[in-house]
Image (cartoon, helix red, strand yellow):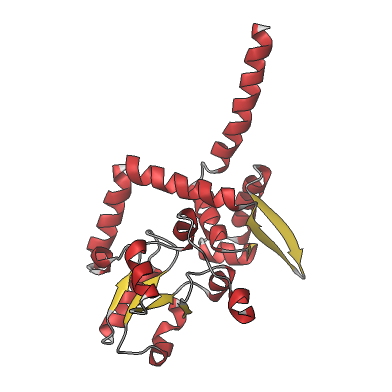
Amino acid sequence: MATSHRQFKDRIYEQFSRIGKAVSAPKRIELLDLLCQGPRTVESLAQQASLSVANASQHLRVLRAARLIESEKQGLYVEYRVADVEVCRFFFALRKLADSHLAEVAQVTQTYFAQRGVMAAASAVSGDELLRRVRNGEVLVLDVRPEEEFRAGHIPGARSIPIAELKARLRELPRGREIVAYCRGPYCVMAVDAVELLRKHGYRAQRMEQGVVDWRARGWRVEKERERVLS
């Protein structure tokens, strides 16, 4: 009887370890982060994560074997997505655990911003403060992620201008309103780049650390593009 109990526990924890093994590579964690922003092809994931398509495919196979992601044929391409919302909650919990227990996370972040000499990191506004300002119509919320991520889910009322297009589309933004830019979360630098560019051209701009994953984790509503079309 004792042996059967031991075998049962060993088999259970072996299954748990499959998740740990799947996220044991930094690039696979980054791929999960990207997929929590929205579905993507392997080509898009490879570009965003600075991987070859072959390497990205290998990492995706590991994540899929652990049932963390799924794939579906879309025309000529294969589209990958997280298996369900629990995967993004797991990613969020993993990130929060690292934030609170690994001092190196803060050290790496501080060193990066110090080397850039930017002030945007210190002027990030909290999600609660942003929510109050948005409800009062006090700020323009700017989503600077790629358009495909915006369509998959964004903060209600946000305007989409991908960082790569921002400089050419500055005229679309009103100068009389404060702008709060956000991207994929506290370690995404697209919003930092956006704030730098906006301030350089005379706009009042701040960065929000929270992204869509953070909003979902708080239980706040995330809007999808089709919702705006139907409303």
Q: Where 33 falls versus 172 (above or below)?
A: above
- In this rendering, the count of numbered labels is 0
User: As drawn, is 92 to the left or to the right of 149?
Assistant: left
Give 50 or 220, whichever is nearer the viewer.
Answer: 220
Residue for point 64% across, 55% down: 57
Q: Is residue 51 visible?
A: no
**Residue 123 relative to residue 101: left or right:** left
Q: Is residue 166 left or right of residue 40?
A: left
| Rendering quarter of residue 11 | top right
Residue at the (54%, 37%) spot, across then down? 20
Between 55 and 175, the one nearer to me in the picture = 175
Q: Position of residue 151 (x, y in %)?
A: 58, 73
Furthest-front residue in this view: 136
Which picture quadrant has residue 76? Answer: bottom right
Visible in this render: residue 216?
Answer: yes
Picture quarter with the C terminus = bottom right
Across and down, in percent, residue 2 comes to: 64, 7
Q: Residue at x 46, y 83 (%)?
A: 165
Q: Quadrant of the N terminus?
A: top right
Does residue 32 lie above or below 179 as drawn? above
Q: Is residue 95 left or right of residue 45?
A: left
